[in-house]
Image (cartoon, grey):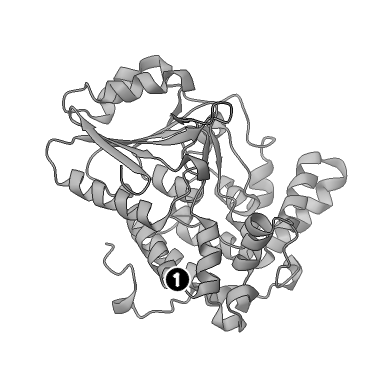
Amino acid sequence: MTDHIQSETRGNAGFLTLDRARSLNALSLPMIRALTATLLAWRDNPAVCLVAIRGMHRDAASGTDQPFGAFCAGGDIRFFHQAVLAGNPELEDFFTEEYTLNYLLHCYPKPVVAFMDGIVMGGGMGVAQGAGLRIATERCRMAMPETNIGLFPDVGGGYFLGRCPGRIGEYLALAGRTLVGAQAVEAGLADGTLASMYQHEVWEMLGSLPSPTLEMVRAGIGARLQAGGGVPIAPRGYIDRFFGLPTVRDIVQALENAAADDEWARDTAAALRQRSPLMLHVALEQVRRGRMMGIADDLRMERDLVRHTFHPAHLARTGVATDIVEGIRALAVEKDRTPSWNPARIEDVQPEMVEAFFRSPWPAHAHPLRALT
């Protein structure tokens, strides 16, 4: 085990376990580096034909760590906060290397199987969505809640949310709603559901398959891998009706106009009013641009966005004056849950504030992700 990452090979399969259970397997820079190094080594190892990824879970009753039960809660946002305040240059390294890892997974030449059990959010989605077989359990709680902390759904979110059916991607990006396993299948963010009780059996099976392929894995799981369904994400037609509108202001206004007679519209409008107004606008544009991009271009765009998020020079802000630092303070540090957003209202966000996020701060030849093809 190295840097909260367990790795082993059995048979023709490589097994990766995120082992930072006390922090819900939140990704640190050493974890990202360990994952990347192992995946690169296995990519070039002909004896490894398939890779499986899971997370460890801290059992509250016994105080012990158990396999499965939590995948990954995202990036280490406390590190983000501390790094900004300290001027730590590793903050830049974190996002460059995390997005490089996301790209590696999306383009990996060997099958990857992700066991999406328990919490799967943020950076955990960046790891899982690159897998060729994304297995969700009934305990899966999936979300991209970044607008709640003044960020946007990164780690390739523009790419994979943009490819959800209809306007589900916009809805998940802006509202940050949590999906259960069957809903993740409906959203195109999981390939099937598996009862959590069978995960260990499937995990062990992967090491016994000769030269395993995804087809062999699916055949080995058999009817236990279900197509999902039965748990609608929202009332029929609602997501496309509201989140297909042109702007964040239009979306919220339409929801609030419907709120008097509709609980879903009322709750969704209230949720959006709590998010960073600026990042709601950025996220909507990100998903709509990402829908038309390949994964490399999307990650380059998101690297530009994250740089502007922490250093919005066009808004003459830095450090604690940014929505991302304020959001993390309110959610994870002081936990008062009363962030002071700037601008404070959705209606106060001007188009030029958003447009500048999509202008790269680097020339093409110097972009941190210029090597992605």
Left or right side of 51 for 259: right
Q: Residue at x 25, y 52 (%)?
A: 37
- The residue under the point 71% across, 68% down is 341
Indicate the quadrant containing the N terminus: top left, top right, bottom left or bottom right.
Answer: top left
Q: Quadrant of residue 85?
A: bottom right
Furthest-top residue in view? 223
323 or 291, which lies in front? 323
- In this rendering, position of residue 126 left or right of residue 82: left
Task: Look at the picture and state if 183 lies above or below 129.
Answer: above
- Work out whether residue 313 or residue 222 is closer to the camera in this orientation and state it: 313
| Residue 294 at least partly seen | no
* Rendering coords of residue 262 (x, y %): 82, 41
Q: Is residue 234 above or below residue 174?
A: above
Image spot of residue 98 (x, y percent) = 38, 57
- Amino acid, disc 1: Asp
Image quarter in which the C terminus is found: bottom left
Look at mark 1 in the image and give the residue it sits on. 304
Give SS at disc 1: helix
Give how far across and how far down residue 278 sits, in percent: 65, 68
Does the image show residue 316? yes
Q: Position of residue 289 (x, y in %)?
A: 48, 62
Question: Horizontal placement of 162 versus 46: left or right?
Answer: right
Q: How many neighbours does mark 1 have within 10 angstroms: few (below 14), some (14-19), or many (20 or more)? A: many
Residue at horizontal 37 percent and vertical 63 percent from the top? 297
